[in-house]
Image (cartoon, grey):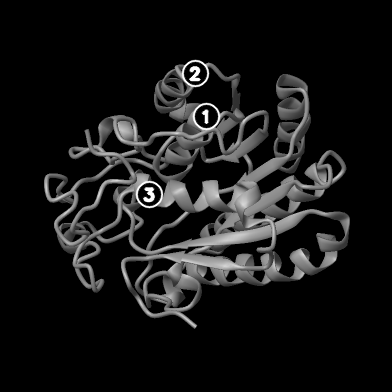
Amino acid sequence: MRTQYTFVDPTTLYADISTRPDDQTEPGLDAELRDRADLGEETYVGTGRLKGRKALVTGGDSGIGAATVIAFAREGADVALAYLPPEQVDAERVAAIAREAGVVVALLPGDLSVHAEAVALVDDAVAQLGGLDILVNNAGKQIYNEDLTTLPDEQFDDTFKVNVYAMFWITKAALGHLPPGSTIINTTSVQAYSPSDILVDYASTKATINAFTKALAQQVGPKGIRVNAVAPGPVWTPLQVTDGQPSDAIGEFGQSTPLGRAGQPAELAPAYVFLASAESSYVSGETLNVNGGMPTP
């Protein structure tokens, strides 16, 4: 059986998963992807690197967040999985897989663009897990737009609320619960460095997340809390088929990377595990790029 440790040719890995044209209504479901993304269900093997830890992962029902939930659970962490209520079917599937590792998995539905719900999420996670020492701000919104003059103010506002404000609200609420040794991991993007012309609002939020990460790392470092970010490149998730990309571009999604393909969520999870674990004890204020070889600063 292949695991995350298996020696493989990365250019041909996942050749059986096609990014075929697809169309879903936002927020989208892994369960309805024509070619379902690999979350590491069959391949991720844990080694106890997060045993006894307690993590909150936003956007944990699908894509990168779901792969991270599964990996954290198999590494021994109890996990609170935050998701939008319409994503219940995905959340329940991921939770069931994670619980097979013998850990506590809490399901926390809510709308993170609403301040009260975002803040309540932290208290709920602490109550159900008995504490908190890992926070993964991963939930995201991406809707393409080809002309700034037609970009609705509401979309611009919603994208910042989900991607930036929620991160701010949740992190602010969590800091009072995080003991020394804790870690915060934010999901930025290659879009922060190499923005697409059709993702002006989304790319702007990802650049903000990068700066937020580096500034906060300096502020809370003396308290023994590390803050880092993961910057994915093109990764196959429901985000892409809910108008995250034009439908006619989905078939070639990720092919412009040096590895010639889109990434899979399972390939991102080890980066989050590394930044959450004690192995990265001297890493803070860092952005770890996982993007198929696309150059970054």
Residue at x-position 81% and y-position 62%? 221
- Residue that mark 3 sits on: 239
* 183 vs 263, nearest the viewer: 183
Q: Amino acid at mark 1?
A: Ala
Between marks 3 and 1 in the image, the one whose residue lies nearer the viewer: 1
Compared with residue 122, is residue 201 higher up or lower down, i.e. above or below?
A: below
Image quadrant for the N terminus?
top left
- Residue that mark 1 sits on: 73
- Residue that mark 2 sits on: 99
Between marks 3 and 2 in the image, the one whose residue lies nearer the viewer: 2
* 245 vs 47, nearest the viewer: 47
Q: Quadrant of residue 112?
A: top right
Q: Pointer 1 and pointer 2: residues touching (CB < 8 Å)?
A: yes
Determine the CA span between mark 3 and mark 1.
23 Å
Q: Which numbered disc flags the more N-terminal residue, 3 or 1?
A: 1
Tag shown at residue 206 = none
Determine the secondary structure under disc 2. helix
Q: Position of residue 74 (x, y in %)?
A: 48, 29
**Left or right placement of residue 79 versus residue 69 in this view:** right
Residue at x-position 42% and y-position 79%? 194
Q: Residues within 10 Å of mark 2 (few under 14, many from 20)?
A: some
**Left or right placement of residue 292 versus residue 59 in this view:** left
Q: Quadrant of residue 228?
A: bottom right
Q: Quadrant of residue 26?
A: top left
Q: Amino acid at mark 3?
A: Leu
